[in-house]
Image (cartoon, rainbow, N blue to C red):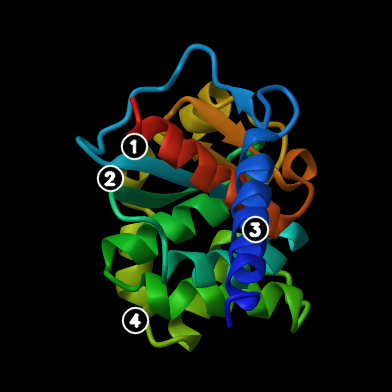
Amino acid sequence: MSRLLPLLLSVVVLALTGLQASAAEYQEGKHYQLVSPPVPTASGEQVEVVELFWYGCGHCYSFEPVLEAWLKKKPEGVSFKRIPAVFAQNWVPAARTFYAAAALGATEKLHRPLFDAIHVDQRKLFDEDSLIKFAGEVGIPEDEFRAAYDGMTIDGKVKQAMFATRDYQIDGVPSMIVNGKYRVTASMAGSQKAMLKVVEFLVDKEKAR
């Protein structure tokens, strides 16, 4: 036992050193970029983490289960929200759909099923009528969904999403934004799982301020 203890201590030290080294290797301009100027947040004392996505994006679809697993164990003091990116007019129906579902308290009913319908079932759900019909399929009354979809409140939400797409200076999705200051993508981080490791690193960085 006396010989085993120093060996175990060495293994622990090496493991901790490796973790410190990997965190220290996250570099601005390589693993993440600054958002300049920073975008104000409304999360108060919490660190805001934002995902920008599009339902038609295959990478966003593959990231969804990775993100969902992370959300179940996300660091304390983190406020998370999704924003539907709007790069062009044909991305607007998806954004309106996301916000209409949220307004009706039906995000869980629609969010993942819509991803599945587009990417597994290969359905072309990119216009107002097909999206409203799909809402009905997942148990959201079509008349209620259409009223929310066409509402002025959603107009404002979509404009905010357009501004966020511009102000966060993203060039693709999925993209993660930490506290309005840092932008992370899978291509920068090395993988989708690594992207969330960089996000955690930046969350700790913000908490230490």
Q: Residue at x 20, y 36 (%)?
A: 45
Choose between 37 and 18: the one closer to the eye: 18
Residue under label 4, please give it: 141
Mark 3 Cα-neighbour bin, 10 Å: few <14, some 14–19, many ≥20: few
Mark number displayed over residue 153: 2
Could you tell which of marks 1 and 3 lies nearer the N-terminus?
3
Distance from disc 3 to disc 2, alpha carbons, whole Å, reads 51 Å
Task: State which mark lies toward you, 3 or 2.
Answer: 3
Mark number displayed over residue 15: 3
Q: Amino acid at mark 4?
A: Pro
Mark 1 Cα-neighbour bin, 10 Å: few <14, some 14–19, many ≥20: few
Mark 4 Cα-neighbour bin, 10 Å: few <14, some 14–19, many ≥20: few
Task: State which mark lies toward you, 1 or 4.
Answer: 1
Distance from disc 4 to disc 3, alpha carbons, whole Å, reads 54 Å
The image quadrant that residue 112 belongs to is: bottom right
- Is label 2 in contact with label 1 (beta carbons under 8 Å)? yes
**Relative to residue 201, is residue 64 depicted above or below?**
below
Task: State which mark lies toward you, 1 or 3.
Answer: 3
Residue under label 1, please give it: 156
The image quadrant that residue 102 belongs to is: bottom left
Is label 1 in a helix, a strand or a loop? helix
